[in-house]
Image: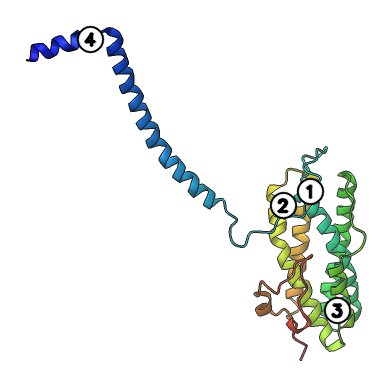
Amino acid sequence: MLSFRRRTVSGLSVATRYTIGSGLVITALAVTLIALLIPVSKFGDRASAANAAPAGKLPAADDDGGGVMSTAYGPLTAADRDFVRKVRLAGLWELPAGRQAQQRGTRASVRTAGEHLVEGHTELDRQVLQVGQALGMDLPNQPSAQQQDWLAQLSRAPANEYERLFIQLLRRAHGKVFALLAQIRAQTRNSMVRALATSANATVLDHISVLEESGLVDFDTLSDASAAPSHHQGAPAPSDVRPTK
């Protein structure tokens, strides 16, 4: 019987043995490919979930539709341009707010905070105008509607409420801008924008420090993220600011 089987196998043509061998190889390769594809597919699902927007992620920058522009200082993205415009807008309302605090403040610490706002944003505004000119950007020349409302709130505030409103409004605004500064400073490939972000970071930190030194910051209210405005987001309602006792 054994000799018969051997004769049967040996009697197969070369073409037949080749076909059988090729079929076995193809089958083995197919099994291996399936085994490889299954974990890759699962990994892809996990990667998609991991790439979902994390909680607390910064909102996307305003897209002006200009795409990435080539400049002598490096690529200029929509996020870069949005940041430069926001720095300009910040000065357009914080400069007059600082001047007003120098005039209306009864505490030396409030007048000092107003002085730092004026000095810091005067220099930062000079720099941002240079950046805008070098990069060929059109910059705003007046505060946004929200910022004008913030200034109106300060102007309407009675004397016994003004200082606390000023400190709280400005402290919230400066606190919220830190994340944006860090993001731009870390990601921009444009040297002019990077230098502006570095200057703005130092200015914001100085302003936060002098505002807190007034002793009027209500940190419990600052911890309420839903109520905290940025330079260009909702201002606190008048009820959020506690009047001076």
**Residue drawn at (86%, 81%) of the image:** 105
Q: From the viewer's perspective, is the residue at label 3 or at label 1 nearer? A: 3
Residue labelled with disc 3: 153
SS at badge 2: helix
Q: Answer with left or right where residue 146 lies relative to residue 209.
A: right
Quadrant of image for the N terminus:
top left
Residue 109 in view, yes or no: no
The residue positioned 87% from the left and 49% from the top of the image is 132
Q: Percent position (x, y) of residue 41?
A: 46, 42
Going from N to C along the chain, the mark reached first, 2 or 4, is 4
- Position of 165 relative to 38 (above/below): below
Identify the mark nearer the N-term, 4 or 3: 4
Image marks 2 and 4: residues in contact by CB distance under 8 Å? no
**Gap between marks 3 and 1 measured at Cα:** 32 Å
Residue to which mark 4 is pinned = 12
The percent coordinates of residue 102 (x first, y second) are 89, 76
Which image quadrant: the C terminus? bottom right
Question: How crowded is the residue under tag 3: few (<14 C-alpha within 10 Å), some, or many (20+)?
Answer: some
Q: Are marks 3 and 2 in contact (CB under 8 Å)?
A: no
